[in-house]
Structure formats: C-alpha cells, structure tokens
Amino acid sequence: MSAQTQEKLFAEFPEASAAEWRKAAEESLAGAPFEKKVFTKTPEGIDLRPIYTREDGQKLPLQSTWPGLAPYLRGSTALGARSAGWLIAQELPYGRPEEFNQALLQDLNRGQNCVHLLFDIATRLGLDPDSGLPGEVGGCGLSLATLDDVGRALRGVDLASVPVHAPAGISALAITALLSAWMAEQGKKPSALHGAVLSDPFSEWVGRGVLPGGLFGAYDEMAVLTDWAARNKAKLKTIGVHANLWADAGGNAVQELAFGLATGVEYLRELDLRKLSASRAGPRFLFTYSLGSHFFMEIAKLRAARLLWARAVGAAGGNEEAQRLVSHGRTSIWNKTVLDPHVNLLRATSEAFVGVMGGCSSLHVAPFEECFRVPDDFSRRLARNIQIILAEECQLARVVDPAGGSWYVETLTLELAEKAWALFQDVERRGGMAAALRSGFPQEQVGVSARDRIASAETRRDGIIGTNLQPNLREKMEVGQPLDYAALAARRAAQIVSYRMSPEAERGAQVLEKLATLLGAPASTKMAILTDAFLHGASLGEVTRVMRSGRDDEAPIAKVRLQRRSESFEAVRRRCEAFKERTGARPKVFLANMGPRKQHGSRADFSAAFFGVGGFEIVGGKGFDTPEAAVLAAIDSKAPIVVICSTDESYPQLVPPIAAALKAVPAGPRVVLAGLPTGQVDRLHAAGVDEFIHVRANCAQMLAAFQEKLGI
C-alpha cells in the first residue's frame, strides 16, 4: 500500500485523543476506580498500565539502536537467529553413560543440534562415583569420571562438529581436559571443542550451601580454563552465570537480573586479579535465564539483561565484543505442575516462544513430566518438536528482535533494567555477590518474593490452570517411578573400582607421575598436563584431589531451594486421592444453597471451586427454601463439611438455625460460611460457624487444615 493510499484511508477516520479513550474506558468500568481496576502490580513492583502510546515510546532512550551494536538492546549479533537459528540444547537427565548415549544419538538424529551434558552432582563437584552419596551419583544427570565413561557417553558423536553445552559447576577445568583427551584420542584437536563448558562456583555454593575447595581455588581454575580457551582461540564459553536458579527458587525478574549481573561482575573482578582483563574474559561468559509465564515480562527481561551486562562490562573497561551478552534459556521449573501435567506442554510452548523473541542463542524446553519423573522418548520428542515448530513452521527466526519497537515491551525493558541496576548496586555496596551471599541477602530477598508469590497462588489471585483453577478431578495423579539411587550409585562405584584395578600397564604409576607436576606447573601448562593425565587413565576424582589439595572448603551459607508454586495444592490433592484409595470415595462437601439461584449462585460457584481444587467431592447444589430443608439434606449427605451459601443480608436469619441444627447432630459436620460479612463474623462464629471462606482466604492452607481436622 502506497503512502498516498494510506493517507487517504486513514483520513476517513477522526483522530481520537488519549482523553477520549480514558473517558470510554471509565464508562465501561461502571463507576469503579480507574487506577485500581486497570493497573496491574507485578511481583517486580512495576505497575503495568492498560495501554501504552507513542508518547511513552518517545520518552525512552536507546530507540535508535540496532541489533548487534552497543548497547545490544536489540540483540547481541546483527542478524540474531536469522543467520543460524538457535541451538536446540535439550537436557538428557540420564545417569549411566550408555543410557545417555542412546538418548543423545536418537535426539541428534531427530532435530537436536547440541550435546547438552547435564552432569550429576558428583561430577560437578569433581568426585568419582565411589566417593559420592546416593542421589549425588547419577541423580538427574550424567555420571562421568573417566575417559572410558566419555567414550561410552559420546559414542558416535563428533564434538568437533557438534557444539557442547555443559554446566560443570566447580569442575569445568577438569571436565574440559577430560573432553579434550577424548577428542585427542579421536584424532581431533582439543581446541576444536566448541560451545560451552561452564565454570560457575556460585551455582553450586548457593544450591548446596557448601563449596568444596573454596572460592579462590575455583576462581583459579576458572582463570586457567578461560586463558587456555583464549590462547587457543577455541570457540568455547567457559564462565557460566546460572541466574535461572534465583527464578526457580521463586525470585522475580528484577532479582534474577540483578543477582545474575552481580555474579558476572564478581567473576570479572576475580579474573582481572588473575591477569584476565574484562575484554579477554567477557566473550567467554554465558548467562542462563529461566523462561517463565509472564510473556512480555520475560521478553523484556532478556532484552534488559543485555543492556545491564553491556553497562557493567563497559564500566569495567571491557571492549564492545566483551559487552555482548550471550544467553541460554531454560523453561521455568517454578510454574510446572504434577496435576494436569499436559498443561505443562502449553506453558513450555509459550516459554520457548519467549526465549526466541527475547534473543536466546540456545534453548532447553523441559518435557512436560520433568517435575515428577525422568522423561521418556515420547515426552522428549514433544519438547524438542516445540522448538522445531517455532523455527520451521512459525518462522520466528525470520525477523531480528520482533518485539523491538513495541511501546509496551520497550517501556517494560527499561523499567526492569532500572530496578535491576538499583538492586545490583545494593549488592555492590554490600561488598559484592560473595559477601552478599555470606550475609544471606540474596537468599532472603528471594525467600520473601517466593513466599509472596506462593501466597498469591494459594489465595488463587495467581491462577494455575488445572491446579488451583479448573481442576480435572477425573485425572489420576501422576506418580513418578522413583529411581533406585542406591543401586545406581553402587553400580557406578563398581565400574570405577574395576577401572582402577585394570591390568593395563602400570596405570596408577603413570597417573601419579603425570599429576605430580600439576601443582607447581605454570597456569599455561595445566590444561596440557591434565589432558595427558586423562589420556593415561586418570579419573576425575584423582585429578580434582590433586588440584584441590591444601585448599579449605568455603564456609557454609544459606542455600536456595528450587521449588514450584503448586506444591501445596498438590499435597492437598494427594491426600484426597489417598483417602479415595482407602475408602472408595472422595471426602464430601455439601453446599447448603439458600434461596433462588440469583441469591446463592456466585457463592455456590466459588465454594465448589474452592473445595474442588483440593479434590473434594461437591454435593448438593439446588436452592433450599427453608433452613430445615437444607439441614435435612446436609445430614442425609453424610458430608463432613457443610457450606452455607447466600447473601450477607440473609445470613443473620439463615445461619443460626442451620448451624445450631447441624451442631446438634452427634459428630456433626464442620459448618463453613461462604463470604466474610462485615460486622457479622463474631456473631456468626458464636452461632456455630467454624470457618469462613472468601476471596482473600488462603485456599491451600485452609484445605490442608480441613483435612487435618477430618483425619484425611
């Protein structure tokens, strides 16, 4: 359409003003306060307006920026996903190398284009399987300790051709050497290893509360690995910032951004002390963010992250290349559910969409049953195909920064960045991220946020479809088959013991000889020594024991627990399901609906939903003309809970006779009132009402209390 045609078309419509829109909006609210009804307060403390205008956009800085150019608001590279798409980096949470390899080969042949090495706890800590505890060995991740393990895990895979994504905790240096040794054995140059093997001591420290070998030793290893990658021009990220752990513990977007940024800045400072400048270290960072449900907030978060990192690295003297933030996106753990679990597919789809729109360079989309069992081939295929559909059918990679220019998204991006920068500065005033973690400041902040957000879910202000809204009571709750961690650990321990006792020529003596030179060696030679040691049969545990000898563990700190906002409702439902298994029926709730539908309807619907999300069976439903009729029907139902539903105006006449009659029955039911009538609560309590349910009540806690009193 030509400009002349557009001008003619739009000339037919009168130009409307913001004041006219406001007037029309207020009329539709029928007298309700405008600001109260149409502004939305987010967990980040941001007020979302009902509409954003050109005037909002004109107030924003950075509107003339371009993708790939500082400060990287619109993308870290000029063409973003348009040039090469993004890496489909699906996690494979299998403990045994053979099982991992089977899944990896299958998925690489069906669309995955990155080897995601999700390690178990023991491997990330640098322990051999016979030194780890059950649950640490093979629990939700690959157990890897020797060159033989690597060969079995990566059989048929060429790491010179396929990128790797390996969050390696405090063992990134040793694991990179182990992978390099395997590549050398395959006739490949170790420097051809590409992708990411990520050192991130804070993620282990915060997740476990303890850190073997201490922070300074971990920084030393991070510096050795990063220097090796830089000197060898390896296309390898070596420093990880797993900001997603704050979000999956219940933190909001501002906290995830700020604490992730503070972690990255702390690592930059420590590397600078070890003669690695910001310009040299900056390009080796990879940030991981959680991708949550609030679609536009999450897009804005990923865009704000690039602004914040560019500003921080620039202040540290880093060049423009170092200021480019590269991000990996992982669908959220926080919002996934055991109840109605296929809804997780829908959540993950929108979250993957967020990752692409926000500019992630790689993505993991969690299978729908991640929170209660190890995925199978089918669920992995569904999760992987979400990404492939977004790329091939939705064609999201055709446009760079498709959210750019939206007045809403741009405003939200800047508001998030400002709030996150302020919180980051607070961390810096406390001495940096390590000092803040020792004092418990980030843990406390995220704990408060998690409690508030869980309270919103438990009061059903924050809806969880299939859990606290629209439950499917016909579903059978999924119960994951628990892994036998003890058997898995024992099997892996037996393998490593057998490996050490191998009759191959004097393996032990050769390993000791290779490792003897490690401690006093210059940093520039350590990777070569480690690689040689693995080629001669060293195990991960043997290597890390030598590297960490004489180093003290870091002092314990308050740890952060990953959690899901639906857990309390799932616990309530699980108890009701167990009750049904024992007795053959769900616990009943009788609705004593008084008067015609228009009198009791809204509160009856509310009450049915309130108890329904807990797995209770709702009986009754018709309107009763008299208290006597309601009481007879309630007693006949044998329901242990009776909810009286009517209007505040009718309660003074209806409630006392109903409650008195029900209380007169031996072992009578709990009497509950729908609503919280102003000025009547004490009188109605005295009349026999046990509890009041209303929109401000904590649904999950009240249901759990009812279950306890009923012995469910």
Image (cartoon, rainbow, N blue to C red):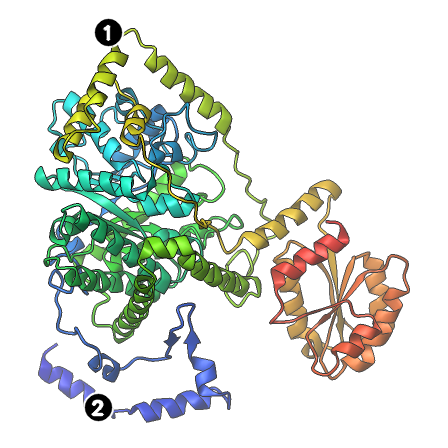
Point out residue 485 in the picture as x, y percentages from the top left corner.
Answer: 49, 29
Residue 284: in sight, yes or no?
yes
Point out residue 362 in the picture as x, y percentages from the top left corner.
Answer: 25, 48
Separation of marks 2 and 1 at Cα, in angstroms = 90 Å
Residue 10, by quadrant, is bottom left
In the shown orientation, is residue 339 left or right of residue 375? right
Which of the image's four quarters has the N terminus?
bottom left
In the shown orientation, is residue 593 left or right of residue 17? right
In the shown orientation, is residue 592 left or right of residue 308? right
Residue placed under numbered mark 1 in the picture: 505
Residue 536: in sight, yes or no?
no
Towards the viewer: 154 or 257: 257
Disc 2 is placed on an element classified as: loop
Residue found at x 55% / y 65%: 460
Point out residue 123 in the picture as x, y percentages from the top left corner.
Answer: 35, 32
Towards the viewer: 711 or 561: 561
Query: Which disc number belongs to residue 555?
Result: none
Q: Amino acid at mark 1?
A: Ala
- Is 263 placed above or below 600 here? above
Disc 1 is placed on an element classified as: loop
Towards the viewer: 162 or 607: 162
Q: Amino acid at mark 2?
A: Glu
Residue placed under numbered mark 2 in the picture: 12
Instruction: Give the number of callouts.
Output: 2
Residue 325, by quadrant, is bottom left
Q: Earlier in the sequence, mark 2 or mark 1?
A: 2
- Is 689 placed above or below 174 here? below
Residue found at x 40% / y 90%: 24
Q: Nearer the viewer, mark 2 or mark 1?
A: 1
- Is 280 placed above or below 140 here? below
